[in-house]
């Protein structure tokens, strides 16, 4: 198992390797995957769960924030898919799972750029699903509801409750809800499923 982040990882396991890099750094991403290819000669699964948000009114959102969100959520996701796809295509097998959000179908006010970036991820998932299918690679996405993480720590509780009320199941998501969908997408039996996005909480 391999992971990466900008900060150091305190998790230690004999079967885990960690890379310190910024996923927005194209050269660093290429170098990481080159190392993976050299060490392991293959890659089965890619989980693209890195992302940032911008929860602010559009009139109060600076262009620098727009660029940062789009670079992290869209460009970096594409780069990771591209480099992973190169390795997976050699073995004619691969599972890629991207992260979307219910903010896109719910068209949440105050999250224009975040929702738009994830809409791009959904489109990317659909097209890559078709482009990579000849190589035995599936590309799907999971769209979580709000989960108690740092991403929503600064969001007013009243706004969060209003958001939850628009879901079929008006509760916060759990990590197990997300991992369940990921497990489904990466199963051998899911080889005929690609280009799909599953939103949690009954959102569609």
Image: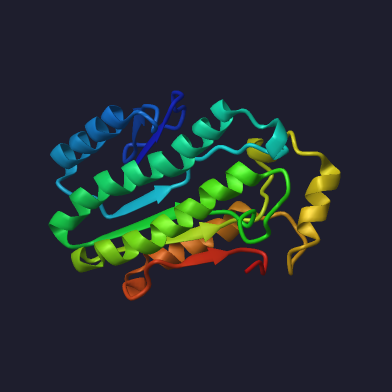
In the image, 52: left or right of 1?
right
The quarter holding residue 20 reads top left
Decide which of 99, 61 is in the foreground and name it: 61
Picture quarter with the C terminus: bottom right
Decide which of 1, 158 is in the foreground and name it: 158
Q: Residue at x 53, y 36 (%)?
A: 69
Q: Residue at x 46, y 52 (%)?
A: 121
The quarter holding residue 202 reads bottom right
Picture quarter with the N terminus: top left
The reply to whether residue 94 is in sight is: yes
- The outermost residue toward the top is 8
Where is residue 198? Give x, y as percent.
53, 66
Where is residue 164? Give x, y as percent.
77, 57
In the image, 37: left or right of 197?
left
Where is residue 116? Give x, y as percent.
56, 49
- The outermost residue toward the right is 158
In the image, 158: left or right of 110?
right
* For residue 187, above or below residue 35: below
Q: Residue at x 51, y 31 (%)?
A: 68
């Amino acid at each position: 198992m391999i992971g990466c982040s900008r900060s150091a990882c305190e998790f230690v396991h004999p079967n885990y390797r960690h890379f310190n890099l910024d996923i927005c750094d194209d050269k660093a991403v290429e170098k990481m995957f080159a190392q993976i290819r050299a060490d392991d000669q293959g890659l089965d699964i890619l989980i693209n769960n890195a992302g940032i948000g911008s929860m602010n009114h559009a009139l109060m959102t600076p262009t620098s924030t727009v660029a940062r969100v789009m670079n992290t959520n869209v460009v970096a996701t594409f780069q990771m898919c591209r480099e992973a796809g190169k390795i997976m295509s050699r073995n004619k097998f691969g599972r890629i799972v991207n992260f979307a959000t219910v903010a896109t179908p719910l068209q949440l006010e105050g999250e224009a750029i975040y929702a738009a970036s994830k809409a791009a991820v959904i489109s990317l998932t659909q097209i890559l699903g078709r482009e990579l299918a000849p190589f035995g690679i599936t590309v799907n996405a999971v769209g979580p509801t709000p989960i108690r993480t740092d991403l929503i720590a600064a969001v007013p509780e009243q706004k969060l409750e209003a958001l939850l009320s628009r879901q079929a199941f008006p509760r916060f998501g759990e990590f197990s809800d997300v991992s369940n969908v990921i497990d489904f997408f990466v199963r051998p039996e899911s080889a005929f499923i690609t280009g799909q996005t599953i939103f949690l909480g009954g959102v569609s």
